[in-house]
Image (spheres, rainbow, N blue to C red):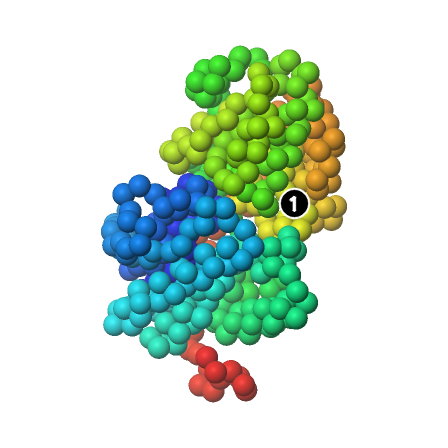
Amino acid sequence: MKILVYGINFAPEPVGVGRYTGEMVQALQAAGHDVRVITALPYYPAWKVSEGYAPHRYAFDTWQGVPVARAPLWVPFRPGGRKRVLHLLSFAVTSLPLVVRQLFWRPDVVWMAAPAFVCAPAALVAARLTGAKAWMHVQDFEVDIAFGMGLISGSGWKRFVFACESWLMRRFDHVSTISKAMVARARAKGVDADRISLVPNWADVNAITPLRGPSPYRAQLGIPEDAVVALYSGTMGVKQGVDWVAEAAVALKSQPNLYFVLCGEGALKAQAEATCAGLPNVRFLPLQPLEQLGALLGLADIHLLPQRADAAEMVMPSKLTGMLASGRPVVGMASPGTELADVLASCGRPVPHGDVPAFAEGIRFLADLPGLRHELGRQARAYADQHLAATTVLAQLERQMVELANTPRPVKPARGELL
């Protein structure tokens, strides 16, 4: 089977949708499928085109034996609002010639990852012109998030954008997403139930395991072996709420045996560093190599998962999978009754969104109770083994893809459908 993977983020990015897409491509290739990738020049999460790539030129290379075509795009120095929309649109435009080139290859499935939703028209056109099936995988409902966070505003503009989103989603042969709540959101946008599936973010439970001894990062960062480490690892952007981690560190600065480690890159990193300036128990790390992920996550005695309410109800955080696989408890922000809150209740401490005192108290509470941390960490690992194992999730995804490719499309399109 020939599979064209199309999306703005792709490996070797070690975080978020780029990492998951890369691991999916590896699994599909290992299963014997012919896979090609169209993506952007690597720029995330630093928001800067990586060294070795010319910012305004196309690049063609291979990754793990898979052909990868990379389109240039505009990368704003400070992303947000209209700049982010223009950033996504730039990739949609520059990647279009690469999509057209695949018409002669004639893929069986065109698989598109959202974000960025602006790529949906090109993915649909490629699929229809080649006779391929079109699959959209929704990692974030970016349109909902953009309006919820005020990055885009205006009631008339909102109605128009949501109508376009719904129209496009309903023309994909299959839509998948990463949580039950997001499946329900896709249904609310008009996608038929028999064309939606749940494909949760997965974890390599063989590569990420609970460490039996101290992480080598402790010595590297000068953290005593008996200290309790609260770790935030991931993108340091607006929707992630990393500023609340910094504020919690300030609130708990009098706890002598509690250290905070913040690892990653993003627009709010400088702000977090300024907030924590002068605190002896706070360490910052740049983004670490993917092969060090197990050791990094094993540094934590407590994982930290801050989230803004206007973004959190629409996503299941991708970073959560590694946290759970590492066998450590999680203090995270979640609304009662949500899927995330239910998971955190069994393997950590859920607290209200944006409530820094409650967030800090949850960290302090677990820091004082090593026995409880151990039990909650055991439950976290058990959840990862049962629900998030990469081999299980990816095998299911591959079966669904083959099934979709072999399912005949109805002879007559639904009334009013142009694509």
Number of marks in the rendered image: 1
Choose top left, top right, bottom left or bottom right for residue 157. bottom right
Q: Position of residue 307 (x, y in %)?
A: 63, 42
Residue at 74%, 49% (x, y): give it: 337
Residue 155 x, y percent position in the rendering: 68, 67
User: Which residue was labeled with disc 1?
Assistant: 308
In which image quadrant can residue 58 be found?
A: bottom left
Q: Position of residue 124 (x, y in %)?
A: 43, 72
Taking depth in this image into account, of 130 and 400 the one nearest to the observer is 130
Q: Residues within 10 Å of mark 1 (few under 14, many from 20)?
A: some
Q: Looking at the image, which is closer to me, 139 or 264? A: 264
Please say whether residue 242 is visible from this viewpoint: yes
Which corner quadrant of the image does residue 142 belong to?
A: bottom right
Q: In this rendering, would 44 be left or right of 199? A: left
Question: Is residue 246 shown left or right of residue 213?
Answer: right
Q: Is residue 67 above or below residue 386?
A: below
Q: Secondary structure at mark 1?
A: loop
Placement of the N terminus among the 4 image quadrants:
bottom left
Q: Is residue 352 above or below residue 326?
A: below
Q: Position of residue 233 (x, y in %)?
A: 52, 34
Say which residue appears at 39% left-offset and 36% top-offset: 290
Determine if residue 322 is in view: no
Give the amino acid at mark 1. Arg
Residue at point 66%, 30% (across, down): 247
Q: Is residue 364 above or below residue 291?
A: above
Identity of the residue drawn at 64% across and 61% down: 153
Task: Using residue 139 as the reference point, say whether residue 331 is left or right of it.
Answer: right
Q: Is residue 267 above or below residue 273?
A: below
Q: Nearer the viewer, residue 127 or 240?
A: 240
Of 154 and 266, nearer the camera is: 154
